[in-house]
Image: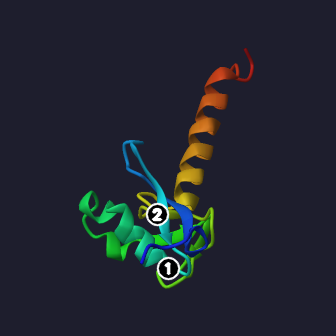
Amino acid sequence: MPQSAEEVIEVSVAWVDAEGGQFIWQGPVPAGATVAVALAESALGNRIAGLGRLDVGIHGRLVSRDQRLEAGDRVEVYRPLQVDPKHARRQRAVARGRQAGAKQPARGE
């Protein structure tokens, strides 16, 4: 028996790799489907080794794979951080300080 339009919702799955390449899948899933179902339908697991260990979210908010989806949800797969954000901020501040110091004339000149 075919499903009616009310029994299917449209969602998307998004992934960006370390080089900036994007994978976006948009398609139908059964109403009441979970994040895990959308990931399986997208076949993203064929492109990413270890997909089951990565964090996922909906519109920027972390969720579990058993989270039920609503029409229009965008499931996002998050890569692990390569650098601690606090450490990266400190490195940028130090570099900016060095650049600012190099541009200023020495005292007494």
Q: Secondary structure at mark 1?
A: loop
Check disc 2 and give the amino acid type: Tyr
Q: Which residue is mark 2?
A: 78
* Horizontal side, residue 16 vs residue 69: left or right: left
**Label 1 sits on what residue type?**
Thr
Which residue in the protein does label 1 denote?
Answer: 34
Question: What percent of the width, then of the height, locates residue 82?
Answer: 41, 58
Q: Which residue is outermost to the top?
A: 109
**Pick the front one: 103 or 1:** 1
Kindly check if marks 1 and 2 are in contact, taking CB atoms under 8 A apart as contact.
Answer: no
Foreground pick, 50 / 66: 66
Counting from the top left corner in percent of width and height, residue 34 is at 49, 79
For mark 2, does the 10 Å Cα neighbourhood hold few (<14), some (14 to 19), or many (20 or more) residues?
A: some
Residue under the point 33% across and 69% down: 51
Measured Cα–Cα span from mark 1 to mark 2? 17 Å
Q: Residue 23 location, x and y as percent?
A: 40, 49
Residue sitting farthest toward the right: 108
Left/right placement of residue 105 relative to residue 55 reads right
Examine the rendered structure and indicate whether residue 32 appears above or below residue 78: below
Which residue is drawn at the image coordinates 73% and 23% (left, top)? 107
SS for tag 2? strand
